[in-house]
Image (spheres, helix red, strand yellow):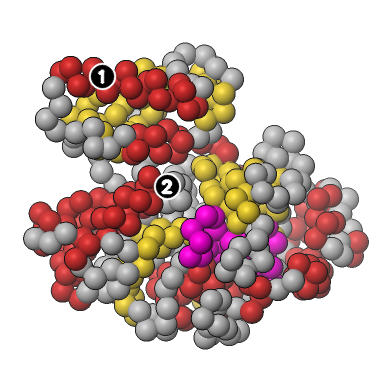
Amino acid sequence: MNRTPFSESWWSEIEGAAPAEAERIQNERLGEQIRYLAARSEFYRTKFAEHGVDPAAVRTVADLAALPFTEKQELRDSLSRTPPLGAHVAAAADEIVQIQASSGTTGSPSYVGLTRSDIDTWCELGARALYANGFRPGDRLLHGFGMSKGFVGGLPIVQILQYMGIVDIPIGAEAGAERLLRVQADQRPDALIGTPNFLIHLAERAPEIVGQAARDLGVRAISVGGEPGGGLPAIRERLETLWDATSREMLGGTDIACTYWGECEAGDGMHFLSPDLMVAELIDPVSGAVVAPVAGAEGELVYTALRRRASPLLRFRTRDHVVVTGTDCACGRTGYKVRCVGRTDDMLIVRGINLFPSAIQQLIVEMRPETTGEMRIRANFEGHSTQRPLPLIVEHAEGLSRERRAGLKAAIEDRVRSALNVKTVVELVPDGTLQRPDHGKVALVQRIGS
């Protein structure tokens, strides 16, 4: 695979491929991958038989719509029944050189095996995304994702950066704000990566810890991911103002690869960059029907790997809910662009209105400086649906009088109702009440009793 940039604008030539050429490559490689699954994966042989799938009949990406999805729970069951890597593993044990683990927020982690060629594929996918974000060979980068527990934000990011010719300083978010900021002040790396809320937290702590504003610490380019929100205008403006750097978003996940969507300098959505290495379908999360990726369309992303050996997946449901922001771009990339607004299984339904927590977060951040930008939804109901007003906890800034706090509470409730058609009951709490992000993702929804 290519290990140097194709041009000043793109990491790989495929990023600007004409749609017909991208489709030709996808169809060719899909046929190869389906044959590989039929020959090497016990999991998919069984699945094909159960659903009456003839692998030889799958010739084009359009044919995928007739095939069953692969669900996360199926992978968990497979791992449980056939340890260590499940019946869906399709490479010999002596070919596997690395194992990654998901966060395991709903139980045991999901484990993903990688062959050497799989690592190369992950690195190529990631290089395209991070290059689009503004990272360049020769950069020096402070690593603000978690480095422990086998997360894909740790070692795989290091591998991608080394593949790109970037020097990674792998401190990791677990080291804490003081350690990270002191390394930033000492080493002055010009690139920074991490979750958006954690990097805002770092910047806010910089004057206290190193005696300098974050904007004076030398960062030129920031890449954020790991949680929704990095593309929200208010969050992005906060990041870019605090660090005096560009902030661009990327998206990935353990089961398919580390990162494979990347936002370019236009800053209006993450491009699909790799038709030669994966298929990305957009589906209606309720009906499962394929949705055409035209501007304004929304749905759940479903992936099929085209160059995976150890833990390949076919029509894997990610539950990532996205909105298509465009189908062309001044940068010349031809992959459509998306903004991730949340996970389908995180969506709340308030008196019949679908609501992603990130939509409320955007409104609260926009109400700085009277708010700190920190908020949590207190879910005092079972499941994802309620007929009652939504309890919302919001931090207010220091020094607000009782009268101003009362006015702020009313203003927040009015603004959410006006913008999102959802009624809330706001509880204001002092600055510092809500836990700040560490190396984990920020949970905007708090379940009572959790």
In-image side of 344 versus 443 (left or right) = right
> Label 1 is placed on what type of residue?
Gly
Q: Position of residue 435 (x, y in %)?
A: 25, 39
The mark nearer the N terminus, 1 or 2, is 2
Q: Which residue is mark 2?
A: 233
Residue drawn at x 26%, y 19% is 407
Is residue 311 visible in the rendered image? The answer is: no
Q: Which residue is mark 1?
A: 407
**Quarter placement of the C terminus:** top left
| Nearer the observer, 148 or 161 | 161
Q: Position of residue 6 (x, y in %)?
A: 57, 83
Label 2 residue SS: helix
- Above or below residue 351? Residue 437 is below
> Label 2 is placed on what type of residue?
Pro
In-image side of 406 versus 249 (left or right) = left
Crowd band around label 1 with a 10 angstrom C-alpha radius: few (<14), some (14–19), many (20+): few
3D distance between C-alphas at marks 1 and 2: 25 Å
Locate residue 433: give its quadrant: top left
Q: Position of residue 58 (x, y in %)?
A: 86, 61
In-image side of 251 versus 174 (left or right) = right
Q: Are marks 1 and 2 in contact (CB under 8 Å)?
A: no
Residue drawn at x 52%, y 14% is 387
Residue drawn at x 51%, y 22% is 421
| Nearer the observer, 49 or 402 | 402
- Above or below residue 383? Residue 285 is below
Is residue 367 visible in the rendered image? The answer is: yes
Q: Which residues are magenta?
A: 259-280
Magenta stretch contains residue 83? no
Residue drawn at x 51%, y 65% is 264
Label 1 residue SS: helix
**Quarter placement of the N terminus:** bottom right
Q: Position of residue 100 (x, y in %)?
A: 48, 64
